[in-house]
Image: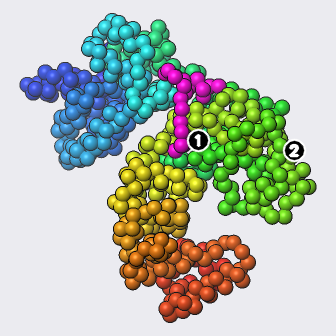
Amino acid sequence: MAETVLTNTGLDRFLELLDGTPERRDPVFTRAAEAVLGLLSLRGADRGTGVPEPTPGLVRQLLMEDLPTFVYAPPGELAAYPAVLGALAARFDGGRGERVVAVVAEAGPDFERAMNDPGNLTWHRWYASLLRSCGADLGDPEDVRRRLAALDGAPLPDGVHRADLMGRTALADVLLAEALTRAYVRDAEAPPPTGPLLTDHAVATGIGQVAAALQDRWTAAGLAEQLAGPYARFAPGPDAFPHLVLADALLDEHLDYYGDSATPVPPPPAVETGAGPGAVEADADVLIAAVEELAEEEFEPYGGEAPHLLYVVYQRGCFAESVARKAAEYEDWTVDPALEDLPVAVPAEAPAEYATPPVPELVRLLGTAELDEADRARLEGPAGELAATVDRLAVTGLVFRSGDAFGLTPRGAGVVRYLLGVRGVAAPDAAQAAAWSAPVVVAAAEGWPAGVAARVLADWLRARGDSAEAWSALLAALGTVHAGTTEAAAVRGLFAVLDSASAPADALRGALRDPVIGAYALQALRDRDEPADAIQVGTSARALYVLDSLPGKKGPLESRRTAFDEAAASWPGGSAALVRAMTAADRHEAQRVLTPLGIAMP
């Protein structure tokens, strides 16, 4: 029992102070008090008065981190934990109690969310919840063992993978072992008058055994021993997940692209998983075996690029990529940035042996008109070596290559999505992306290739019946998401990927007064020969439309300046007025486009 492992937590004294109260007779309250006082003591709370003194910082950590990591409590019993903190705070005067009570009240809703969040589950917390739902007495190790035996093949929470539970459990083990070690050292260096938390005998048996005893007390009696012994297959550790090495590599790729795991990758158009539980994990193990084989010297120079190849195709929304274009990038050839994500047609049939595309196709893929047969010959070696790397991945059935095109199969897309998800990368499927609000889907699509953004935004509108309301919400988001930042111009640019020809006219007319995309809506109506009141379009929207129409980086400076001068000639007030309007509407983009042209900013 944990109360004999953690001594001098003040539990007996605390319960004595509650004599005569309903809480004193409530076993749920007592169990909560054991965990709360034990964790506060482990975290270094002052025990000079006989009970640990809660501080705002310790209470916040307890509610938001420690309890959701180490303790299982059914939803109906969660209120006992804040109640214990309230009763404990009442034992301290001088305003300390009031500050703690305020923190408890503020963090209460977040505490309940954290305790119920499947992302915070460990193996021990999850199996405790399953056992309780089966009617087990969580304080009886024999009943726990018997009920555990009946849970063979127990389901996981929706959206949670075994690797998630394994990772959270491993982290919890480390955190608890560290807390126990620090508490023992702290008491040894400065012995408290109330006595140490851990006896020398308890520590001599091993910190791991002490931690297991605490896990049993805070989840289910005897559970730690069972999951470490006869039912270890129910709670596999890191060795059962070799594919997490690949998950780490894909996370690194995502951070290189976006810098934040919360920035979502596009949803694949189709995802498949094998039949039965653990199928996606089995596929991931097959994939990591191929990736590790490619890392051997015989697959140089591109074998080590397998994680990048997998990620870059997924990041393109699973549109096929070109072997030749990717090889050209590796060889530092110039590739037009506008063509980097150009979709590649997948031939229905192609010879198994790889052949570099003809010169006209290379020109189309790379955007370099000066290419000739000599250039194609120079690319044959690198492209062939890269194709060999892709072909080894294709043996898994998770990657395909047809001619120059390669990509992920639907099952491969499911595996990569799983691997990204277990490392915390936002990787929605198509249904999840379609359920987002307009600002969320626009913010995500801004960072995606144009073709992917077009598909996802079209699906988003289609999920809402392409209604005027949906279009109006999406158009409004184009004018508000990332407003005033360096990304605002890219968000406006999403208008170009929308099928405005199919947009309800009422939605476009309703956007005419929008200070950001009003002129875009006006032009869309004109292109359709629809009536539109141009006078509704404000100066800022017209200035942004002109600004976005200017060549920002391409072409000689002289021709870019000429384009500006032609636009300024028809602007009321001339170039100075146009520059002022552009700067007021989007200073970041105006500076980026106009400064190279020698135009001074106001």
- Quadrant of the image occupied by residue 337: bottom right
Residue 72 screen position, x and y as percent:
32, 25
Q: Which residue sits at x=61%, y=48%?
A: 316
Residue 471 shows in the view: yes
Q: Is residue 157 above or below residue 431?
A: above
Outermost residue on the front side: it is: 529
Decide which of 541, 302 is in the foreground and name it: 541
Residue 441 screen position, x and y as percent:
45, 54
Q: What element carries label 2?
A: helix
Q: Which colour scheme is used?
A: rainbow
Q: Which residue sits at x=25%, y=23%?
A: 31
Residue underneath mark 1:
251
Residue underneath mark 2:
381
Amino acid type at image mark 1:
Leu
Decide which of 203, 530 is in the foreground and name it: 530
Residue 303 shows in the view: no
Q: In this view, does 381 lie above or below 238?
A: below
Decide which of 232, 286 is in the foreground and name it: 286
Residue 77 screen position, x and y as percent:
22, 28
Image: magenta residue range: 267-286
- Quadrant of the image occupied by residue 180: top left
If you read the primary sequence from the N terminus, does the residue marked by circle 1 or circle 2 appear first? 1
Outermost residue on the bottom side: it is: 573
